[in-house]
Image (cartoon, rainbow, N blue to C red):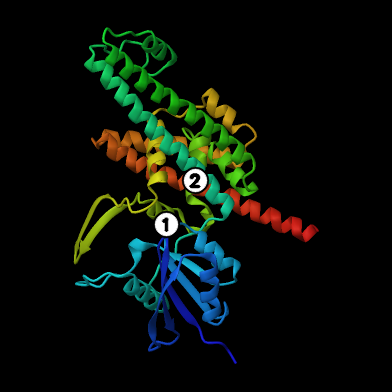
Amino acid sequence: MKKATRFVGLDVHAESIAVAVAESGRDGEVRSLGLIPNRVESVRKLIRKLGGPKGLHVCYEAGPTGYALYWQLTELDVECEVIAPSLIPTKAGDRVKTDRRDAVKLARCYRAGELTAVWVPDREHEALRDLVRAREAAKKDQLRARHRLGKFLLRAGIRPTETPTWGALYMQRIRTLTFHHVAQQATMIDYLSEVDHHTARIQRLEQAIDQAIEHAPPVMREVIGALQALRGLAKLTATTIAVEIGSFTRFANAKKLMAYVGSTPSEYSTGGSRRQGAITKTGNAHVRRVLFEVAWAYRHRPGLGPALKQRQQGAPLEIVEMAWKAQHRLHRRYTALTARGKPHCKVVTAIGRELLGFVWAIATHVERNHIQNEKGERAAA
């Protein structure tokens, strides 16, 4: 006899999990099972109480607890999905929110097929993404430390010179400064030590990223290497895009990837009217940030500098051709939009969106070739 399907909603917190179950069928019962501790053994007991993994479909919202529960349930052979919180249907006028009600709502909506699951990385992928985000956080901390030191020097009447700010000569000049007041000297030493600390921290993290890439899965290394064939897209930027997107082939076309990143225009259309506004910004902010930074490089005429030439060495010919096509197309696009009087920020946004299309084309080409090669090796074995 076939076992009945059960849809389980979990409202997960650091110390507790609210559990609700929706029985299969349109009119199946939806009931709360209360709270359990957020511990490995408690989750195992819950699965046994529900009759084992067979027939169970479990979901919970993506949040600060990460994917540890997903990996645990997967190891127990339980079908689990992590749900995008912003896409959960919300009833108008509902002003009561509790853990129990949230779990019941998840179970009911999951049974109805109204929830959208997010892509869950494996442990190796998640580890590299954490490292890349740690480096991004270190860059923000370095910027704050530099701002504090720069504003302190400005208040003291010391203004920047023609020397490039924060370069080796600039830092050497700052280290030779002395102040009459002991308090000012102590302040300058503290601010300067913070800048040095964050600079060393970034160097350590970048070295760790290089080592992690060497031990990353082969397909990820291939994607990171191929993306560097694009202008303005060096190793750290390529790694950021690769680890944040994950599998590019899960997007059927480039437009879906653009929507995922939040780079598509918002729209309000009704009847015969159609209005488009600013980009939605509903997707991955990390990819969107680096993408628009890279887009500025396409304001220059197509060319092949020493750094780009070195990155393209050893790359497949079809990848290099796509990168060269991107240079010509995006530069023409930048020139045309600028000639129409569009603001530079809007032009760069449009260029970044089209650049993402070339990123998708290159990455999916690499991933599909990798899959075909693996199939060929298995068939030969």
Whether residue 324 can be seen here: no
The earlier-in-sequence mark between 1 and 2 is 2
**x and y, in percent, of residue 57 in the image:** 50, 75
Q: Which residue is mark 1?
A: 256
Whether residue 84 can be seen here: yes
- Residue drawn at x 48%, y 67% as measured from the top left: 81
Image quadrant in which you'd find residue 355: top left
Q: What is the CA distance from the residue labelled 1 to the residue labelled 2?
A: 25 Å
Give the residue type at disc 2.
Asp
Image quadrant in which you'd find residue 372: bottom right
Near mark 2 (Cα within 10 A), the count class, few <14, some 14-19 or many ≥20, is: few
Q: Nearer the viewer, mark 1 or mark 2?
A: 2
Q: Identify which residue, 1 or 321, lies in the foreground.
A: 1
**Pointer 1 with pointer 2, Cβ within 8 A:** no
- Residue drawn at x 48%, y 30% as measured from the top left: 201
**x and y, in percent, of residue 112 in the image:** 39, 78
Which disc, if any, is residue 176? none
Q: Identify which residue, 90 or 182, lies in the foreground.
A: 182
- Residue drawn at x 28%, y 40% as measured from the top left: 346
Secondary element at tag 2: helix
Which disc, if any, is residue 130? 2
Residue lying at the far front of the rendered structure: 182
